[in-house]
Image (cartoon, coloured by chain):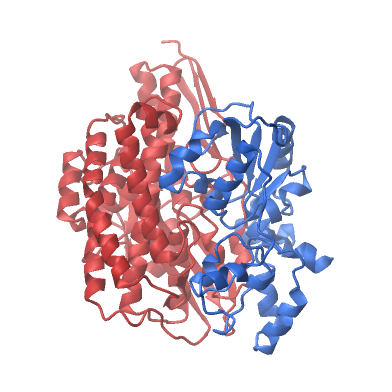
Amino acid sequence: MKIDMNIDVHHVTRVEGHGNIKVKVQDGELREAMWQVVETPRFFEAMLRGKSHDLAPTLTSRICGICSIGHTLASLRTVERAMKIEIPRTAQLLRMLGKHGETLQSHFLHLFFLVVPDFFNVDSVIPITQSHPEVAGVALRLKGLANDMSDLLTGRTTHPVSLVVGGLSVAPNKKQLAALKQTILDRLPDVETAVAVFQGLTLPDFVRETEFVSLKGENEYPWIGGDLISTDGVVKPEDEYRAMTNEYKEDFTTTKFTKLSRKSFAAGALARLNNNFKLLHPQAREVSKSLGLEPVNHNPYMNNVAQLVECLHVALESVEIIDELLDDKYEDICAEYEVRAGEGVGAVEVPRGILYHNYQIDDEGFVRKANCIIPTTQNNGNIHHDMPELVKHEVAKGSSDKEITRLCEMLVRAYDPCISCSVH
Amino acid sequence: MKYLGIDPQKIKIGVFDFTSCEGCELQLANKEETLLDFLSHLEIINFREVSSYKGQDYDIAFIEGSITRQDEIDRVKDIRSKAKVLVALGSCACFGGVNFQKNQFEIDDVVREVYGADKVETIKTMKVADVVQVDLSIPGCPVNKDEVEKIVVDLVTGVDVRTPNYPVCVECKQNGNTCVVDMGKICLGPITQAGCGAVCPNHKVGCLGCRGPVECAKIDSLMDILKERGHTESQIMERVNFYNTFSEVINS
């Protein structure tokens, strides 16, 4: 069959940051399929040099406008491990609750504002507010809950304020926590509606066998710290994150790429779920099965479903955390500490996947050397390698260039890339 | 009635991101309780992060981010030529923001530190007004959605846009906070323009001045007070320079 295609999507829409899709097919043969990131780098690692350790989390939260709580927590963990600071249990629980607020905020933003318009064949969520007001209502209420959680626990929805070295600078009172618990419970039917919406959608049937990398949960679904694991059987301690990522650079793109056992790997909700399915809340596990998602799933579009499953898991776990906090003495929210020299690594599962910060700190508390490896940096290579397989799969089916363009854009969106983050 | 050349009806907007975290434009989609009302004032012509529609006939262009590469200079000039009103959204656009911290190092040095021997194109960080005329500035890291809403409604209804001409301390006192300087911390509230509701001191964290200087900011006096309390000049200046918001006051 004589098929020629020249797909050139300059700055893919409904994603965070700037990237292009380029596909060339000649006489039915794939010549090129490329995911090209063109984002301007900001050089955070260079700017961190000489920065006071207590301003490093404030600075690095600005790497990302969506997962700023995650960056702050990774930065804090790095500083606290470097200086051997033990943070109080109450502060750990409060931080986790703030983190869950961000996961909900980010996942719901992605699912409803960026992904769902593809399935309703519209440009944005705005027409959906007219055509499907019930879906828009669910989206706004759930995103509202998530923003309120982030506000209450960290002081702001974007660029948190009260997360500081040692713990938190202020904490909500128990009455506020009890009210939050009630709001979460009140919103669970909205989560069920969201699940029903996704049960009604047909995701593209593309599969490419992939290695998935995430934190390794021991007794709980993992979010902050611990060993690193891949679905190809690699397990490493947190401090050996470089051996888990193996960053390298290609000329055609401003992002770095990573690899482990194969030429690329995936991080994110699907990777977490593929590696830690048994640790999901039982209700979330059942919902996952009802949506056709069980490990190890190799369809990248299923990352959307994994995000939704995680939303339910996180909402239910937040209720449990609040119950523990309500029974807690609730006195000590910040540890005193002495400045000392050291090196630390902080691995945190943020909405788009596993994030690493690594600093060397001198005896006056200044950062001397820094390295940050971002989830989307890890995913960019996998998107790039998915694309030729997807195009070949679709060309063989006889799909039109319009349809292939749509599927390529949806593939990029499925990874929920945070491109400016990836080129920090 | 026209204001800044625009009819007080649904206004056509474009939102464009340059070197930034995109956190400010995300605020436009936040505050769910008023989001639909807010959007009802706007016709979104071009907003890549939220919509696939890419029109060019926008009246107001919101620019997020600072300028750090040659192609961004060309792009922002093109947007300027199409927009009736150009708004700098957030501290990166208004002042350079955290991206400006790069400028304390040589370009070769920052590229080598992050990319080693690989070549990556970048230039010294500039604020938007270094490249094109800016009609309105909405500072903040991130911007405060309440303030953005108010300014957009002012633009739609033709009311003069006003921003507070008093320091963060006024809002902080109204909130009944204990002064964080009295808690032994460095706070730039006394020299910083209000409008954020004193969000950082509300959480017992010192202000870093992301909204820029209040009129008649007296940095020297604040410096004296903070030094008396045992903070060193370098500790204070690390904060004053954090978002590059005070460079014009320091250099004047």
Residue B235: image location, x then y, percent:
66, 79
Residue at 61 percent across and 75 percent down: it is B187
Residue B212: image location, x then y, percent:
68, 61
In the rendered structure, the colour chosen for chain A is red
The single residue placed furthest to the right in the displayed view is B252
Q: How many marks?
A: 0
The single residue placed furthest to the top in the displayed view is A1
- Above or below for B54 versus A35: above
Residue at 73 percent across and 41 percent down: it is B73
Viewer-nearest residue: B188 or A297:
B188
Residue A405, quarter of picture: top left
- Above or below for A106 versus A208: below
- In the displayed structure, does residue A236 sit left or right of residue B96? left
Say whether residue A115 is visible.
yes
Viewer-nearest residue: B177 or A191:
B177
Check the picture and name the quadrant holding the N terminus of chain A: top left
- In the displayed structure, does residue A217 sit left or right of residue A37? left
Residue at 74 percent across and 54 percent down: it is B124
Say whether residue A386 is visible.
no
Viewer-nearest residue: B70 or A157:
A157
- In the displayed structure, does residue A410 sit left or right of residue B252? left
Residue at 52 percent across and 65 percent down: it is B199
In the rendered structure, the colour chosen for chain B is blue
Residue A247: image location, x then y, percent:
50, 55
Residue A13: image location, x then y, percent:
50, 34
Check the picture and name the quadrant holding the C terminus of chain A: bottom right
- In the displayed structure, does residue A230 sit left or right of residue B98? left
Residue A367, quarter of picture: bottom right
